Image (tube, rainbow, N blue to C red):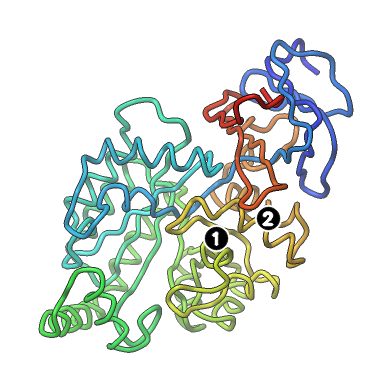
Amino acid sequence: MRGRATTTLRGGRLVLADRVADADLAIEDGRIVDIADRLPPGQRDLDASGRLVLPGFVDLHGDALEKEAEPRPGVFLPFDFALVQADRRYACAGVTTVCHAIAFASGELGLREPERARALALAVLEPAGPPLVRHRLHLRYEITDAGTAPVVAELLERGAAVLSFMDHTPGQGQFRDLAAYAAYLARTYGTGADEVARRVEAKRSEAAAALARVEALAARARARGVLLASHDDDRLERVAALAALGVRASEFPIHLDAARAAVEFGLAVIVGAPNLYRGGSQSGGLAARAAIAAGLARCLCSDYAPQTLLPAVLRAAREGLVTLPEAVALATRHPADLLGRPELGRIVPGARADLLVVRADIDPPTVERTFLDGEPVLEAVPRGSRHV
């Protein structure tokens, strides 16, 4: 161990890559410096006995910021205020690195209009104050929308971490028929039948030119080391075409065959924690549990509910879908590796000390402490507890 550790977590059950170990963990200068059965006292000792110690979650797709910025359709809050609120939600959920998924799609109203979406993206890239957790930008581009492609290109230059391609044209993907698409618009925006027909026609008329836009954006993203992802894959041909453009992740494939196709083409399958925790997809798509049980899922993201990440991870292990280290890796090590950040998402000497102290013996389980770079950003230990 190098010198005197700033912080020592004592007696926790550390979830390592291949096992769970009862051990002490020492932190110095924002990094994990030692793991051993018994370490000498540090400048600050914290009792973690009876608690799980996990790496902080690395979330590739989180929609919570959009919900904070537009809590009801057409009702907007200041975006810097929304980021502060989302920041605290993620810290409480144990997410230490979040890729905020911001969608760009003209004509879908709300936050997805390009200028609003751009302003929200800039709030992520240029936060007004020091955040509790690490914020990154995930650009979601609706491929039938010609008008927002320049905005997406600009934000790639400014430092986005992920770019995903989505296509909500009825007849494929999430909306396998026109009725499902119309129901979504009516439920979300109160859109009438005539407006639905107009939007469908606009999407179909832009489909022919979509490939050129996608190719250009993909090339720009690859040149900057941005992770490319697809969204709602439903057929092998789509997966093959996107893989040829450098796409390396498939978010929320519609069924098991699409997930298998993604894996065959080398794409990491990403499933949602709310889906796993609830027991199924809210839109009738592939159940995350089935994807994990089949050995197809590589990553677990928060999607629209960051608070479900911890209970979903623990449920996957408790139900025997995977071991606890494998379940934790779905939300930590694997997404960190996809981002090209091997110093995140693992408990090993030299890794960043992004750590969670978790009480897992209660339902729902609770994150009691969240550390970012070795510094406690959340301490929710019950009053009178010896874990102080």
What residue is drawn where x is 65% and y is 71%?
Answer: 296
Would you say 206 lies left or right of 345 here?
A: left
Looking at the rendered structure, which numbered label has been put on residue 273? 1
> Where residue 55 appears, x then y in whole percent?
66, 40
* Mark 1: few/some/many CA within 10 Å (<14, 14-19, 20+): many
| Residue type highlighted by circle 1 | Ala
> Where residue 78 appears, x then y in whole percent?
21, 40
| Residue type highlighted by circle 2 | Leu
What residue is drawn where x is 36% and y is 39%?
Answer: 85
Q: Is residue 107 above or below residue 71?
A: below
Would you say 54 lies left or right of 281 here?
A: right
Q: Secondary structure at mark 1?
A: helix
Q: Is residue 120 above or below residue 25?
A: below
Specify which label sits upstream in the sequence, 1 or 2: 1
Q: Are marks 1 and 2 in contact (CB under 8 Å)?
A: no
In this view of the protein, which residue sits in the foreground, 215 or 361?
361
* Mark 2: few/some/many CA within 10 Å (<14, 14-19, 20+): some
In this view of the protein, which residue sits in the foreground, 361 or 93?
361
Instruction: Pick out the residue farthest to the right.
Output: 37
Q: Which residue is mark 2?
A: 314
Q: Secondary structure at mark 2?
A: helix
In this view of the protein, which residue sits in the foreground, 332 or 21?
21
In three-dimensional space, the C-alpha distance between marks 1 and 2, rounded to whole angstroms, equals 11 Å
In this view of the protein, which residue sits in the foreground, 365 or 271?
365
What residue is drawn where x is 68% and y is 48%?
Answer: 362
